[in-house]
Amino acid sequence: MQRRLGTTGRADRFYADQVLDHLNVRMQEFVARQEMFFLATADRHGECDSTFRAGPTGFVQVLGDRLLAYPEYRGNGVMASVGNLSENPRLGILMIDFTRDRIGLHINGRARVVLDEEMRAYYPGLPVDPVPGRRAQLWVMVEVEEAYVHCSKHIPHLQKVPANERGARAWGSDDFKRKGGDFFGAAAEAAQRQPFRRPRHTNEHLRGGLHEDTPEHGYGAEPAPVPGQRNRAGDTVAAELNGEFLERVERVLARARPRGPAEDAPEFRGWFDRRDG
């Protein structure tokens, strides 16, 4: 397409000047202060999904110039992103600072899904968030392959609403109305279409987990990152994201339950305090 549209020269300059295979110091600082990002994944058939992730400042942890991790909080149970990553470890992340620098950062790479208990075994300094709905059940570790700027010229400049003027966030809530209700009328439309039968899902790529026609050992791609070390040549995603792992995830999620503020929790020392190691 570059050749057809005559943009090869501009593209080559962008590759040479802006595209890195790691996060430099300024990129790491940018990631560490973000409160949200957009995530793109696809299953092994190429069925795509885009979604949104958010948390307190620092919820994405920079573990090195080629490794970062973000938590997966309790959601709607669809597990679209984790399901896609179980088949295809490639992902794309877009972080946009709408309020301060009005700039964006693209991060593309390979992912590995890690249980919270395993993540803490490798990184014991991770704090425990006091908000039940923000307690990670899983982590996604990302091995950075590309990092580059998203230009500012079309990014709107937004302002934060003061805390005393906005409602409290319903982290981890199952309350239908607090989660947005039937804002787009999908449930009403489905009920009108089939008033006595639950609609059958046809979008298999949103189910999460492996498809029936997936090879026994999952998506045959390059190795996914391992906490604290580089991957051995010849490893495959099968060794990390297979049926046994998914069964363990299901067991962990089955044990998970909402915890109230009255329950004891370690003192919250801030997100990913570097003094914790």
Image (cartoon, grey):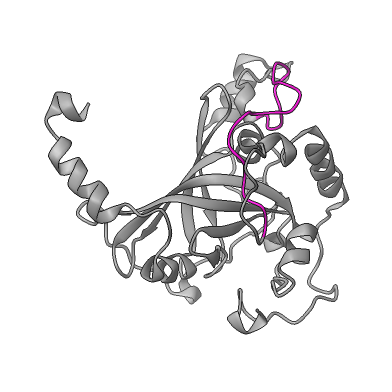
Residue 148 on image: x %, y %: 33, 53
Q: Residue at x 59, y 46 (%)?
A: 111
Judge left or right: residue 236 versus residue 102: right
Which SS type dominates the magenta stretch? loop
> Residue 60 appears in which quarter of the rendering?
bottom right
Toward the viewer: 46 or 221?
A: 221
79 w.r.t. 174: above or below:
above
Q: Quadrant of the C terminus?
A: bottom right
Which residue lies at the image location 68% right of the left edge and 47% below the top edge? 113
Residue 37 in picture, x, y percent from top left: 47, 54
Examine the rendered structure and indicate whether residue 218 appears above or below residue 263: above
List the single residue furthest toward the front: 233
Q: Is residue 69 found left or right of 159 in the rendered image?
A: right
Q: Picture coordinates of residue 272 (x, y %)?
A: 61, 74
The residue depicted at 64 percent of the width and 58 percent of the height is: 229
Q: Is residue 68 magenta?
A: no
| Residue 29 visible in the shown view | yes
Where are the magenta residues, as a range?
A: 207-227
Which is more toward the observer, 19 or 174? 19
Give above or below for 34 relative to 277. Answer: above
Residue placed at 71% from the left, 75% from the top?
Answer: 125
Residue 175 seen: no
Q: Nearer the viewer, residue 244 or 271?
A: 244
> Taking 179 as reference, is 36 left or right?
left
Q: Quadrant of the N terminus?
A: top left
